[in-house]
Amino acid sequence: MTSLIVEPTDLTPGVRFLPSTFEFEISGESRPENVRKFYEPVMEWLENYKVWLKSNKPGSVDKLIFKFKFQYFNSTSAKFLTSIIARLDAIRKEIMPVEIEWYYDTPDVDMKNSGEEFSKMFTLPFRFYSVELM
Amino acid sequence: MSKKDDFVYDILQVMEQNNVLLAFTGEFDMRVINALVNSVRGKLSSVESNPSVQKKVYNVMVECLENIFRHSAEAKQDEVALRSFAIFTLQKQGNDYFLVTGNYIKNGSVVQLKNMIDKINILDKEQKKEMYRQILSNGEFSEKGGAGLGMIDIAIKSDSRLQYEFNEIDQQRTFYVFQVRIHNNYTYSKN
Protein backbone atom coordinates (compact mmCIF):
# COMPACT_ATOMS: atom_id res chain seq x y z
CA MET A 1 0.00 0.00 0.00
CA THR A 2 1.55 3.32 -1.06
CA SER A 3 1.71 6.34 1.24
CA LEU A 4 -0.28 9.51 0.67
CA ILE A 5 1.84 12.59 1.16
CA VAL A 6 0.56 16.07 0.34
CA GLU A 7 2.67 19.07 1.23
CA PRO A 8 0.84 21.88 3.06
CA THR A 9 0.20 25.30 1.50
CA ASP A 10 -1.28 28.52 2.92
CA LEU A 11 -4.72 27.30 1.86
CA THR A 12 -4.52 23.53 2.06
CA PRO A 13 -3.47 21.15 4.83
CA GLY A 14 -0.55 18.77 4.79
CA VAL A 15 -1.46 15.10 4.60
CA ARG A 16 0.82 12.28 5.75
CA PHE A 17 -0.76 8.86 5.62
CA LEU A 18 2.04 6.33 6.01
CA PRO A 19 0.68 2.77 6.22
CA SER A 20 4.12 1.18 6.60
CA THR A 21 4.70 2.90 9.96
CA PHE A 22 1.00 3.42 10.81
CA GLU A 23 1.38 7.20 11.01
CA PHE A 24 -1.62 9.13 9.86
CA GLU A 25 -1.77 12.89 10.16
CA ILE A 26 -3.57 15.82 8.54
CA SER A 27 -2.55 19.29 9.65
CA GLY A 28 -2.64 23.00 8.90
CA GLU A 29 -5.05 25.39 7.26
CA SER A 30 -7.97 24.28 5.08
CA ARG A 31 -9.75 26.76 2.84
CA PRO A 32 -8.92 25.41 -0.63
CA GLU A 33 -10.15 27.21 -3.74
CA ASN A 34 -11.64 23.92 -4.87
CA VAL A 35 -12.43 21.88 -1.78
CA ARG A 36 -13.72 18.84 -3.65
CA LYS A 37 -10.61 18.66 -5.81
CA PHE A 38 -8.41 18.70 -2.72
CA TYR A 39 -10.29 16.16 -0.60
CA GLU A 40 -11.40 13.68 -3.25
CA PRO A 41 -7.96 11.98 -3.54
CA VAL A 42 -7.78 11.76 0.26
CA MET A 43 -11.15 10.01 0.42
CA GLU A 44 -10.21 7.75 -2.46
CA TRP A 45 -6.97 6.78 -0.73
CA LEU A 46 -8.91 5.85 2.41
CA GLU A 47 -11.30 3.71 0.36
CA ASN A 48 -8.35 1.86 -1.15
CA TYR A 49 -6.68 1.52 2.23
CA LYS A 50 -9.80 -0.08 3.65
CA VAL A 51 -9.84 -2.65 0.85
CA TRP A 52 -6.12 -3.29 1.36
CA LEU A 53 -6.54 -3.69 5.14
CA LYS A 54 -9.15 -6.39 4.63
CA SER A 55 -6.59 -8.77 3.23
CA ASN A 56 -3.56 -7.35 5.06
CA LYS A 57 -4.67 -6.99 8.64
CA PRO A 58 -1.68 -5.59 10.58
CA GLY A 59 -0.23 -7.77 13.31
CA SER A 60 2.06 -5.15 14.81
CA VAL A 61 -0.59 -2.64 15.93
CA ASP A 62 -3.97 -3.23 17.50
CA LYS A 63 -5.49 0.07 16.42
CA LEU A 64 -5.03 2.87 13.88
CA ILE A 65 -4.62 6.42 15.17
CA PHE A 66 -5.45 9.34 12.89
CA LYS A 67 -4.17 12.73 14.05
CA PHE A 68 -6.06 15.88 13.10
CA LYS A 69 -4.02 19.04 13.74
CA PHE A 70 -5.85 21.94 12.16
CA GLN A 71 -5.12 25.63 12.53
CA TYR A 72 -8.31 26.51 10.68
CA PHE A 73 -10.80 24.87 8.36
CA ASN A 74 -13.71 26.59 6.65
CA SER A 75 -17.27 25.31 6.73
CA THR A 76 -16.97 23.77 3.27
CA SER A 77 -13.95 21.77 4.42
CA ALA A 78 -15.96 20.62 7.45
CA LYS A 79 -18.32 18.87 5.07
CA PHE A 80 -15.45 16.89 3.56
CA LEU A 81 -13.87 16.17 6.94
CA THR A 82 -17.20 14.61 7.88
CA SER A 83 -16.85 12.26 4.89
CA ILE A 84 -13.28 11.41 5.86
CA ILE A 85 -14.25 10.60 9.45
CA ALA A 86 -17.16 8.51 8.13
CA ARG A 87 -14.64 6.43 6.16
CA LEU A 88 -12.49 5.97 9.24
CA ASP A 89 -15.56 4.89 11.16
CA ALA A 90 -16.29 2.34 8.43
CA ILE A 91 -12.79 0.88 8.85
CA ARG A 92 -13.44 0.66 12.60
CA LYS A 93 -16.76 -1.12 12.07
CA GLU A 94 -15.56 -3.55 9.43
CA ILE A 95 -11.89 -4.18 10.07
CA MET A 96 -10.10 -2.93 13.20
CA PRO A 97 -10.21 -0.26 15.94
CA VAL A 98 -9.59 3.32 14.82
CA GLU A 99 -9.15 6.36 17.03
CA ILE A 100 -8.95 10.06 16.27
CA GLU A 101 -6.57 12.37 18.09
CA TRP A 102 -7.87 15.92 17.77
CA TYR A 103 -5.20 18.58 18.41
CA TYR A 104 -6.00 22.27 18.82
CA ASP A 105 -4.16 25.42 19.82
CA THR A 106 -4.96 26.05 23.48
CA PRO A 107 -6.71 29.41 22.90
CA ASP A 108 -8.70 28.13 19.92
CA VAL A 109 -12.03 27.28 21.56
CA ASP A 110 -13.72 27.00 18.15
CA MET A 111 -11.33 24.26 17.02
CA LYS A 112 -11.98 22.31 20.20
CA ASN A 113 -15.74 22.72 19.75
CA SER A 114 -15.58 21.60 16.11
CA GLY A 115 -13.85 18.40 17.19
CA GLU A 116 -16.50 17.82 19.83
CA GLU A 117 -19.24 18.23 17.23
CA PHE A 118 -17.58 15.64 14.99
CA SER A 119 -17.20 13.27 17.92
CA LYS A 120 -20.96 13.50 18.59
CA MET A 121 -21.70 12.47 15.01
CA PHE A 122 -19.71 9.23 15.11
CA THR A 123 -19.11 6.36 17.48
CA LEU A 124 -15.37 6.10 16.95
CA PRO A 125 -13.40 7.46 19.91
CA PHE A 126 -11.88 10.95 19.90
CA ARG A 127 -9.09 12.08 22.19
CA PHE A 128 -8.51 15.80 22.58
CA TYR A 129 -5.13 17.44 22.96
CA SER A 130 -4.63 21.10 23.82
CA VAL A 131 -1.31 22.27 22.45
CA GLU A 132 0.62 25.51 22.93
CA LEU A 133 1.25 26.95 19.47
CA MET A 134 1.24 23.97 17.15
CA MET B 1 -6.77 69.38 -3.18
CA SER B 2 -9.80 69.98 -5.33
CA LYS B 3 -13.23 69.98 -3.78
CA LYS B 4 -14.27 66.69 -5.33
CA ASP B 5 -11.32 64.85 -3.75
CA ASP B 6 -12.36 65.81 -0.22
CA PHE B 7 -14.45 62.67 0.14
CA VAL B 8 -11.34 60.60 0.79
CA TYR B 9 -10.67 62.53 3.98
CA ASP B 10 -14.35 62.25 4.93
CA ILE B 11 -14.19 58.48 4.56
CA LEU B 12 -11.04 58.33 6.64
CA GLN B 13 -12.66 60.39 9.40
CA VAL B 14 -15.75 58.19 9.44
CA MET B 15 -13.52 55.14 9.69
CA GLU B 16 -11.48 56.62 12.53
CA GLN B 17 -14.60 57.64 14.43
CA ASN B 18 -15.95 54.11 14.12
CA ASN B 19 -12.68 52.45 15.06
CA VAL B 20 -12.43 50.63 11.76
CA LEU B 21 -9.42 48.33 11.88
CA LEU B 22 -9.74 47.08 8.35
CA ALA B 23 -11.89 48.02 5.37
CA PHE B 24 -11.97 46.91 1.78
CA THR B 25 -14.21 47.67 -1.16
CA GLY B 26 -13.98 46.15 -4.59
CA GLU B 27 -14.27 42.74 -6.12
CA PHE B 28 -13.72 39.87 -3.70
CA ASP B 29 -11.68 37.17 -5.34
CA MET B 30 -9.43 34.63 -3.64
CA ARG B 31 -6.42 36.92 -3.84
CA VAL B 32 -8.24 39.75 -2.09
CA ILE B 33 -9.54 37.39 0.58
CA ASN B 34 -6.05 36.02 1.20
CA ALA B 35 -4.59 39.51 1.45
CA LEU B 36 -7.26 40.53 3.98
CA VAL B 37 -6.87 37.35 5.98
CA ASN B 38 -3.10 37.76 6.15
CA SER B 39 -3.26 41.42 7.14
CA VAL B 40 -5.81 40.84 9.89
CA ARG B 41 -3.53 38.38 11.66
CA GLY B 42 -0.91 41.05 12.29
CA LYS B 43 -3.50 43.69 13.09
CA LEU B 44 -5.26 41.56 15.70
CA SER B 45 -2.08 40.66 17.48
CA SER B 46 -1.40 44.37 18.01
CA VAL B 47 -4.91 45.43 19.16
CA GLU B 48 -6.10 42.32 20.99
CA SER B 49 -4.26 40.71 23.87
CA ASN B 50 -6.61 37.75 24.33
CA PRO B 51 -5.48 34.98 21.96
CA SER B 52 -8.89 33.27 22.13
CA VAL B 53 -10.57 36.42 20.84
CA GLN B 54 -7.89 36.91 18.17
CA LYS B 55 -8.52 33.40 16.92
CA LYS B 56 -12.30 33.78 17.02
CA VAL B 57 -12.29 37.04 15.05
CA TYR B 58 -10.06 35.34 12.48
CA ASN B 59 -12.32 32.26 12.25
CA VAL B 60 -15.51 34.28 11.79
CA MET B 61 -13.89 36.74 9.41
CA VAL B 62 -12.75 34.05 6.96
CA GLU B 63 -16.26 32.64 6.80
CA CYS B 64 -17.78 36.13 6.27
CA LEU B 65 -15.34 36.84 3.42
CA GLU B 66 -16.10 33.49 1.83
CA ASN B 67 -19.80 34.34 2.01
CA ILE B 68 -19.16 37.51 -0.02
CA PHE B 69 -17.08 35.44 -2.44
CA ARG B 70 -19.94 32.97 -2.91
CA HIS B 71 -22.39 35.80 -3.54
CA SER B 72 -20.13 37.49 -6.05
CA ALA B 73 -19.48 34.19 -7.84
CA GLU B 74 -23.23 33.77 -8.17
CA ALA B 75 -23.62 37.37 -9.32
CA LYS B 76 -21.19 36.78 -12.16
CA GLN B 77 -23.06 33.73 -13.41
CA ASP B 78 -26.42 35.36 -13.28
CA GLU B 79 -28.42 36.83 -16.08
CA VAL B 80 -29.23 39.81 -13.87
CA ALA B 81 -26.36 42.24 -14.11
CA LEU B 82 -25.39 42.37 -10.46
CA ARG B 83 -22.31 44.27 -9.48
CA SER B 84 -19.77 42.05 -7.80
CA PHE B 85 -18.47 45.15 -6.02
CA ALA B 86 -18.71 44.57 -2.28
CA ILE B 87 -17.54 45.95 1.06
CA PHE B 88 -16.05 44.47 4.21
CA THR B 89 -15.19 46.24 7.45
CA LEU B 90 -13.82 45.10 10.80
CA GLN B 91 -14.45 47.43 13.72
CA LYS B 92 -13.61 47.37 17.38
CA GLN B 93 -16.12 49.07 19.65
CA GLY B 94 -15.32 48.96 23.31
CA ASN B 95 -13.96 45.47 23.71
CA ASP B 96 -16.18 43.87 21.09
CA TYR B 97 -15.55 43.30 17.41
CA PHE B 98 -18.01 43.93 14.61
CA LEU B 99 -17.68 42.41 11.17
CA VAL B 100 -19.82 43.93 8.44
CA THR B 101 -20.21 42.78 4.86
CA GLY B 102 -22.20 44.50 2.12
CA ASN B 103 -22.89 43.12 -1.33
CA TYR B 104 -25.49 43.03 -4.07
CA ILE B 105 -27.87 40.13 -4.39
CA LYS B 106 -30.87 39.46 -6.63
CA ASN B 107 -34.20 40.61 -5.26
CA GLY B 108 -35.34 37.03 -5.72
CA SER B 109 -32.73 35.76 -3.25
CA VAL B 110 -33.84 38.01 -0.39
CA VAL B 111 -36.65 35.88 1.05
CA GLN B 112 -34.60 32.68 1.25
CA LEU B 113 -31.63 34.42 2.84
CA LYS B 114 -33.79 36.33 5.33
CA ASN B 115 -35.66 33.16 6.31
CA MET B 116 -32.44 31.30 6.86
CA ILE B 117 -30.97 33.97 9.16
CA ASP B 118 -34.27 34.36 11.04
CA LYS B 119 -34.42 30.61 11.53
CA ILE B 120 -30.88 30.53 12.92
CA ASN B 121 -31.48 33.54 15.20
CA ILE B 122 -34.30 31.90 17.15
CA LEU B 123 -32.19 28.84 17.98
CA ASP B 124 -30.34 28.50 21.26
CA LYS B 125 -26.71 27.41 21.41
CA GLU B 126 -27.44 23.67 21.54
CA GLN B 127 -30.01 23.88 18.74
CA LYS B 128 -27.53 25.71 16.54
CA LYS B 129 -24.99 22.94 17.05
CA GLU B 130 -27.66 20.37 16.28
CA MET B 131 -28.47 22.15 13.01
CA TYR B 132 -24.75 22.31 12.18
CA ARG B 133 -24.35 18.57 12.70
CA GLN B 134 -27.47 17.89 10.69
CA ILE B 135 -26.25 19.90 7.68
CA LEU B 136 -22.84 18.20 7.92
CA SER B 137 -24.29 14.72 7.97
CA ASN B 138 -26.83 15.07 5.19
CA GLY B 139 -25.36 13.95 1.90
CA GLU B 140 -26.37 16.60 -0.61
CA PHE B 141 -24.07 19.54 -0.85
CA SER B 142 -23.54 22.48 -3.12
CA GLU B 143 -20.06 23.95 -3.09
CA LYS B 144 -21.34 27.44 -3.78
CA GLY B 145 -24.27 27.63 -1.43
CA GLY B 146 -23.00 25.46 1.38
CA ALA B 147 -26.69 25.03 2.34
CA GLY B 148 -26.47 27.51 5.19
CA LEU B 149 -23.46 25.76 6.70
CA GLY B 150 -21.34 28.94 6.58
CA MET B 151 -24.08 30.98 8.22
CA ILE B 152 -24.69 28.52 11.05
CA ASP B 153 -20.93 28.26 11.55
CA ILE B 154 -20.74 32.05 11.98
CA ALA B 155 -23.70 31.98 14.39
CA ILE B 156 -22.11 29.29 16.56
CA LYS B 157 -18.66 30.86 16.67
CA SER B 158 -19.88 34.42 17.30
CA ASP B 159 -22.54 33.24 19.76
CA SER B 160 -24.57 36.34 18.95
CA ARG B 161 -27.60 37.38 16.98
CA LEU B 162 -26.91 37.84 13.27
CA GLN B 163 -27.99 41.25 12.00
CA TYR B 164 -29.02 42.05 8.47
CA GLU B 165 -30.48 44.76 6.30
CA PHE B 166 -31.87 44.45 2.80
CA ASN B 167 -31.92 47.66 0.78
CA GLU B 168 -33.77 47.27 -2.49
CA ILE B 169 -31.88 49.30 -5.11
CA ASP B 170 -34.10 48.74 -8.14
CA GLN B 171 -36.38 46.12 -9.65
CA GLN B 172 -33.58 43.57 -9.83
CA ARG B 173 -31.02 44.30 -7.18
CA THR B 174 -30.86 44.49 -3.40
CA PHE B 175 -27.90 45.64 -1.35
CA TYR B 176 -27.49 43.13 1.47
CA VAL B 177 -25.73 44.19 4.67
CA PHE B 178 -24.73 41.52 7.18
CA GLN B 179 -23.29 42.21 10.61
CA VAL B 180 -21.91 39.92 13.24
CA ARG B 181 -20.67 40.85 16.69
CA ILE B 182 -17.97 39.03 18.59
CA HIS B 183 -18.19 39.56 22.31
CA ASN B 184 -14.89 39.88 24.03
CA ASN B 185 -15.72 37.79 27.05
CA TYR B 186 -13.64 34.72 26.52
CA THR B 187 -11.25 33.91 29.24
CA TYR B 188 -7.99 32.47 28.18
CA SER B 189 -7.25 29.37 30.16
CA LYS B 190 -4.57 26.82 29.66
CA ASN B 191 -6.86 23.93 30.51
Image (spheres, helix red, strand yellow):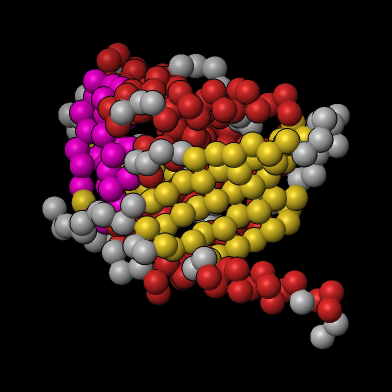
Relative placement, left or right, of A121 versus B107 is left
Residue toward you, A89 or B177 = B177
Relative placement, left or right, of B13 versus A120 is right
On screen, B145 above or below A4?
Answer: above
Residue B2 appears at what percent x and percent y? 85, 82
**Residue B188: quarter of image:** bottom left
Residue at the limit of the structure toward the bottom, as seen here? B1
**Residue B51: quarter of image:** bottom left
**Residue A101: quarter of image:** top left
Residue toward you, A80 or B85 = B85
- Residue A5 seen in the figure: no
Residue toward you, B115 or A97 = B115
Relative placement, left or right, of B29 versus A132 is right
Q: How many marks?
A: 0
Is residue A115 part of the magenta span, yes or no?
yes
Residue positioned 68% across, 72% down in the render: B10
Residue positioned 57% across, 58% down in the render: B89
Q: Which residues fall within the magenta stretch?
A: A100-129
Residue at the limit of the structure toward the left, as seen here? B191
- Residue B161 seen in the figure: yes
Residue at the limit of the structure toward the top, as seen here? A94
Residue positioned 70% across, 50% down in the render: B86
Is residue A90 part of the magenta span, yes or no?
no
Residue positioned 39% across, 71% down in the render: B47
Residue B13 appears at what percent x and percent y? 61, 74
Residue at the limit of the structure toward the front, as seen here? B3
Relative placement, left or right, of A86 versus B29 is left
